[in-house]
């Protein structure tokens, strides 16, 4: 991407300004399994601690795991890595939000799939003035 991309874009990672501000005023507290880095302010502002995430890749809020989401919103004081249980065998790995992409779910009858669907029992019949 280059230096100009880091200066002027925000949608595919942190800008240079955000990285400098994080290095100067923030304290790195952890990294999740996807490589997202979590920070908190070194000093409290108006009695509150600021918390933020720098994404590893595209800025997509659905990439923040539930435990870190809670921490970002002040649900707990401790960093999630310090008290998380071991992952369960039935837990699924993260899948990105596919809305707006070619991989998005499109049910039968969606315009993207031709707009036709199978008739259902008692299906709707449109009114027409001739009938």
Image: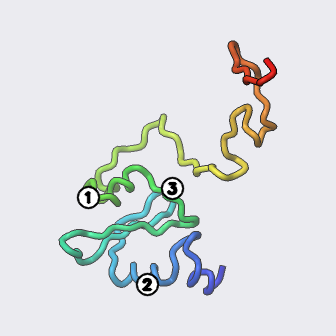
Furthest residue toward left:
47
State the separation of the CA atoms marked 2 and 1: 25 Å
Q: Residue 22 lies in what quarter of the image?
A: bottom left
Q: In whole angstroms, how far apart are the C-alphas of marks 2 and 3?
A: 23 Å
Query: For residue 20, which numbered disc appears in the image?
Result: 2
Which residue has dot 1 on it? 78
Q: Is residue 5 above or below residue 71?
A: below
Given residues 72 and 127, the one toward you in this image is: 127
Q: Which residue is drawn at 46% across and 69% down?
A: 54
Residue at x 58% of width, y 77% of height: 9
Q: For mark 1, does the 10 Å Cα neighbourhood hold few (<14), some (14 to 19), or many (20 or more) residues?
A: few
Question: Residue 119: percent from the left, percent from the top?
Answer: 75, 20
Of the numbered discs 1 and 3, the one sitting upstream in the chain is 3
Residue in view at x 57 percent, y 66 percent: 57
What secondary structure is found at the residue carrying circle 2?
helix
**What's the distance in space between the residues labelled 1 and 3, CA to CA?**
20 Å
For the point 20% across and 74% down, the residue is 46
Disc ID at residue 93: none
Q: Residue 63 carries which label?
A: 3
Of badges 1 and 3, the one in the foreground is 3
What residue occupies the far top of the structure in this picture? 121
Q: Foreground mark, 2 or 1?
A: 2
Name the spot of residue 11 as percent of width and height, x first.
57, 70
Q: How is the image coloured?
A: rainbow
In this view of the protein, which residue sits in the foreground, 72 or 46?
A: 46
Question: In what quadrant of the picture does the C terminus appear?
Answer: top right
Residue 44 position within the rendered picture, expressed as x and y whole percent measured from the top left: 22, 74
Quadrant location of the N terminus in the rendered image? bottom right
Q: How crowded is mark 2: few (under 14 residues within 10 Å), some or many (20 or more)?
A: few
- Per the image, label 3 sits on a secondary structure element best described as helix
């Amino acid at each position: 991407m280059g230096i100009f991309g880091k200066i002027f874009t925000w949608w595919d990672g942190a800008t240079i300004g955000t990285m400098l501000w994080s290095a100067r005023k923030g304290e790195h507290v952890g990294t999740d399994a996807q490589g997202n880095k979590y920070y908190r302010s070194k000093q409290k502002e108006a009695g509150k601690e600021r918390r933020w995430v720098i994404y590893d890749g595209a800025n997509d809020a659905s990439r923040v795991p539930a435990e870190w989401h809670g921490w970002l919103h002040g649900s707990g004081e401790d960093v999630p890595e310090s008290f998380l249980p071991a992952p369960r065998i039935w837990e699924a790995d993260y899948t990105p939000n596919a809305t707006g992409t070619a991989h998005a779910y499109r049910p039968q009858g969606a315009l993207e799939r031709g707009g036709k669907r199978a008739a259902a029992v008692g299906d709707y019949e449109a009114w027409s003035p001739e009938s």
